[in-house]
Image: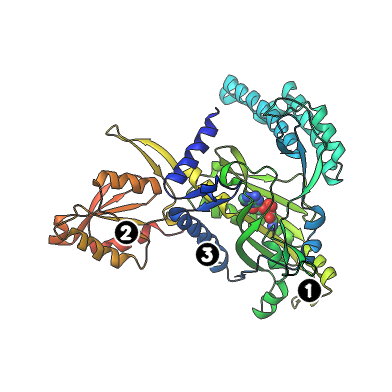
Amino acid sequence: MAKQEDVLKKIIAHAKEYGFVFQSSEIYDGLSAVYDYGPNGVELKKNIRDYWWKSMVQFHENIVGIDAAIFMHPTTWKASGHIDAFNDPLIDNKDSKKRYRADVLVEDYIAKIEAKIKKEVDKARKRFGDAFDEKQFMETNPRVLANLKKIEDIKNRLYPAMENNDMEGIRQLIIDLDIADPVSGTKNWTEVRQFNLMFSTQLGSMSESATEIYLRPETAQGIFVNYLNVQKTNRMKIPFGIAQTGKAFRNEIVARQFIFRMREFEQMEMQFFVRPGTEMKWFEYWKEERLKWHLATGIPAEKFRFHDHDKLAHYANAATDIEFEFPMGFKELEGIHSRTDFDLKSHEQYSGKKLRYHDPEINESYVPYVIETSIGLDRTFLAMLSYAYTEEKLEDGSERVVLKLPPFLAPYKVAIFPLTKKDGLPEKAHEIMDELKYDYMCFYEEKDTIGKRYRRQDAIGTPYCVTVDHQTLEDNTVTIRERDTLKQERVPISQLSSIIGEKLKIKL
Ligand code: GAP
């Protein structure tokens, strides 16, 4: 088994063992690609959501929030293009009976060629040492050039076929590339069919009068249909943004890799309304801002990269992904899209209501252009777990698993331990907890040795552990132990709040 898969398996097992993520309806053997968050998971998730909300709404005077309903008028999805175009091409292998996204089979094939190119480059870098010029190598090495040409030829067939709904063209590409099913190893493929990813349900109790409605596949449309309500009631002036977090639903064909691709998930989206013609400036601005947000967690820059889209969605004139290096490799974490005036214009057409802005600076009315930042909360959660999960050998030869979560995102900020269960130590520990609990999530534990209690807190990422001992009763000092350095210090109880507070500051 590949090492990366091992890491993901360990993270999944750890997430379950320590109450972060459970398979949904596990006692019934689970529901595919649906997950529940446990007591520690719900805290981490809430902290990530709060960090995003603060950075958008609290730190920007021209961004406000909303909370729109999951159910929306069905015409919303006609106007947004989701009824006609929110499809994935699917293909089945007749031997393994496994279902795949046809375009992903081709993209995986491209990724294999890219890996070959990278291998060539790494080999050459080793051979030439400091004198190695990667750009020149890429432009002249015959094997690299042949592989780059191969990729270009494949993309030149895949993207137009996707664009034109040419299912036979995609199938022919799979046949021509000799792509085999990774499970059965055969090339016994069905036709390629379009599959709409939206879940539908019925609104209304009488079957004859019930209307078919959809579970929203993105939160963004709740923002677009409320554009005018928010602009008018909050007297917003362009440029301004509307932020929202909430559940979205997609009937994903291939839903694997734990909480990376789920059928029910949470998005954090912000639509930034701008004057037409200024969208590229704002697109660049939000690219930079969003990367800063990721880096402020303390995760090193080499874990992130931008991936500009070759193939643009029907609504976009520019788009990029912020990719994160998950255990399965670099994958999309967040999308930043310049959505033009597509959505508002389309809602104008379908609703017959004007969705315009009168710009007093240029004395003109127009449909605003939109820059969108869209990030999956669950995917960010997985990114955090992947980065934080660390197996360490300590100086004394013992081993520990520690979640090196950014302290401001950790489920608990401080654990408070009385050294023993007697002599008034539990009472003193509770007294300290009663002081700190209004500002910080505190964890109290008196069972087992202090060493075992430390390990349990390491495993859930608690940045500080405080031990209350007999000296505490005499001089009101405690031992505070830091998660990553393992350093222990004796400090007055009165300083605890400021020590913890200092550690939790967000520096954006
Ligand atoms: N409003 C634009 C939009 O929804 P998207 O690229 O389809 O764009 C945005 O989704 C983000 O939502 C992705 O970058 C990803 O983090 C998250 N996401 C999308 N589908 C997901 C799924 N099935 N499971 C978990 N997260 C998902």
CA neighbours of label 2 inside 10 A, class few (<14), some (14 to 19), many (20+): few
Q: Disc 1 to disc 2, how far (Cα)? A: 50 Å
Badge 3 vs badge 1, beta-carbon distance below 8 Å:
no
The dot on residue 54 is 3
| Residue sitting at x 72%, y 38% | 100
**Residue bearing the label numbered 1:** 356
Please tell me in which quadrant of the rendered image residue 226 appears.
Answer: bottom right
Q: Residue at point 59% right, 55% down?
A: 290
Query: Is disc 1 in contact with disc 2, using a CB cutoff of under 8 Å?
Result: no
Query: 354 above or below 430?
Result: below
- Crowding near pointer 1: few (<14 within 10 Å), some, many (20+)? some
Instruction: State the residue in front, 363 or 25.
Output: 25
Query: Along the line of sight, which residue is nearer the eye, 93 or 508?
Result: 93
Q: Position of residue 198 (x, y in %)?
A: 73, 55
Residue 484's image quarter? top left
Residue 479 shows in the view: yes
Q: In the image, residue 358 lies at what x, y percent?
A: 77, 77
Amino acid carrying mark 1 in the image = Arg
Pointer 2 residue: 499
